Amino acid sequence: MSSISRKCVPFTPFDGDLSRATISIVTAAGVHRRDQEAFNIADELGDLTYRVIGEDTTSADLMVTHHHYDHADADEDINVVFPIDVLREFVEEGYIGGIARKHVGFMGYTMKLKDMYDSTAPAIADEIDKGSRADAVILTGG
Amino acid sequence: MRGIPTVLVTVSPDVSAQMRPPRALYPNGFKIGNPIGKPGMRELQRGVVKDALELLTQNTRPGQIVVMDYPAYGEYHEPVSVKVK
């Protein structure tokens, strides 16, 4: 695994102003909307799919499906892994410019690491790149 | 594609360091499941998210994981260690 980014760190500069920046959240903590299909925790090889979470989603709309960490705290307050309410407060206060149109949740457990790296990760990056209007992304895990 | 700036908040710094993330924050001693803090502790959560966002504007060293202390968290959990080959 350590060979993946051994040659270079894929660093993208942030040359904006946070007070004008639109922020997206991408989390491996198994977060999805309650009305979306849950992640498949029955498959021992994991689940390579992801869920797009829209900008109007509230914390009450969200839940966690993940069986490789204790998400009791996230069940109580999703902000501990997906700080959507925190970002909303920051928008109201003018600390950040806005909340991106799209956020992404996936289950950061898979035995198919090559597929995660070759397929899921680029697909998630594409989701954010196209139509989210995100200037920067906060990444969290479980 | 130019790429999108990211900042990672991790509770497994050794594991994350293997991937050499462009920017990363490790809230010292936070347990797995609590990258942004504990439930209901909004001030703590705000502090962690704000520190993560500020890393976007700072001259961080790509691949380095920044460790910050949050005494309000009130616990210390030893992170998962990884033997790097």
Image (cartoon, grey):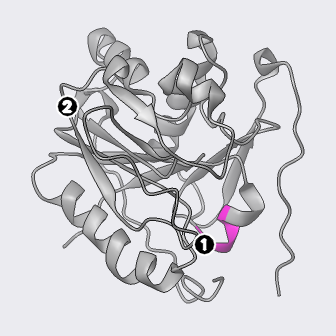
Residue B56, horizontal then vertical, whole percent: 45, 46
Give the residue at x 30% y 73%: A122
Q: Secondary structure at mark 2?
A: loop
Secondary structure mainly formed by the magenta segment: helix
Amino acid type of the residue that numbered disc 1 sits on in the rendered structure: Met
Residue B42, horizontal then vertical, whole percent: 56, 12
Which chain is disc 1 placed on? B
Report the disc number at residue A64. none
Residue at far front of view:
A42
In the image, residue B56 sits, relative to residue B81, either above or below, namely above
Per the image, the residue denoted by label 1 is B19
Crowd class of label 2 (few under 14; some 14 to 19; many from 20; radius 10 Å): some
The span shown in magenta is B16-20
Amino acid type of the residue that numbered disc 2 sits on in the rendered structure: Glu
| A9, A104: nearer the viewer | A104
In the image, residue A33 sits, relative to residue A119, either above or below, namely above
Q: Quadrant of residue A44?
A: bottom right
Residue B84, horizontal then vertical, whole percent: 82, 80
Q: Is residue B76 visible?
A: yes
In the image, residue A52 sits, relative to residue A4, either above or below, namely above
Report the disc number at residue A55. 2
Give the residue at x 18% y 25%: A56
Residue at far left of view:
A131
